[in-house]
Image (spheres, grey):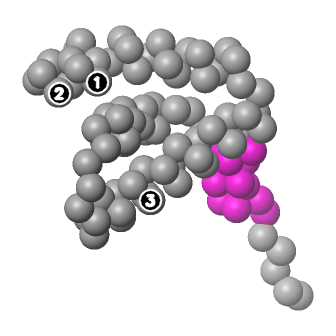
Amino acid sequence: MGLYLNGADRDKLDPILDACVATYNADLDEDGQVDFKGKAKAFVRTYGFLASILTYSNSDWEKLSIFLNFLIPKLPAPKEEELSQHGSSTMPHCSGS
């Protein structure tokens, strides 16, 4: 996060994020991916809410929140999510005759 905080361009940050995505894909099974991505999203939402209403300073949490905000969009959707997102649009509809 030091690169980001020091104003580094995205072309310097993306290789780091891409390495994290590769680890996510290689080291986690589908359940692990669902678990990690869900917890990451929950942390970002919760931290964002708490940071807006409380006056406290935890630089590690702030850095983690920034990192996850960049990482989450790059994480591929687990197959389970892909099926549920695409399933409704590709399933045939029955007409009541």
**Which residue is the site of mark 1?**
1
Q: Residue at (12%, 22%) from the top-left corner?
A: 6
Q: Tell me if I can see residue 9 in this picture.
A: no
Label 3 Cα neighbours within 10 Å, binned few <14 / some 14-19 / many ≥20: few
Q: Residue at (34%, 57%) from the top-left corner?
A: 48
Q: Are marks 1 and 2 in contact (CB under 8 Å)?
A: yes
> Helix, strand or loop at disc 2?
helix
The x, y position of residue 17, in whole percent, is 40, 20
Q: CA distance from mark 3 to mark 1?
A: 20 Å
Magenta span dominant secondary structure = helix
Depth check: give the residue in front, 54 or 66.
54
Q: Is residue 6 magenta?
A: no
First in residue order: circle 3 vs circle 1: 1
In this rendering, the answer to whether 31 lies above or below 56 is above
Q: CA distance from mark 3 to mark 2?
A: 22 Å
Q: Residue at (52%, 54%) from the top-left corner?
A: 42
**Which residue is the site of mark 3?**
46
Left or right: where 4 falls relative to 72: left
The x, y position of residue 53, in whole percent, is 28, 69
Image disc number at residue 80: none
Viewport quadrant of the C terminus: bottom right
> Helix, strand or loop at disc 3?
helix
Which quarter of the figure has residue 90? bottom right
Q: Tell me if I can see residue 24 in this picture.
A: yes
**Which residue is the site of mark 2?**
5
Q: Residue furthest right?
A: 97
Residue type of the residue flagged with mark 2: Leu
The x, y position of residue 18, in whole percent, is 44, 17
Please state the extent of the stretch shown in magenta in the rendering. 80-92
Depth check: give the residue in front, 72 or 83.
72
Residue type of the residue flagged with mark 3: Thr
First in residue order: circle 3 vs circle 2: 2
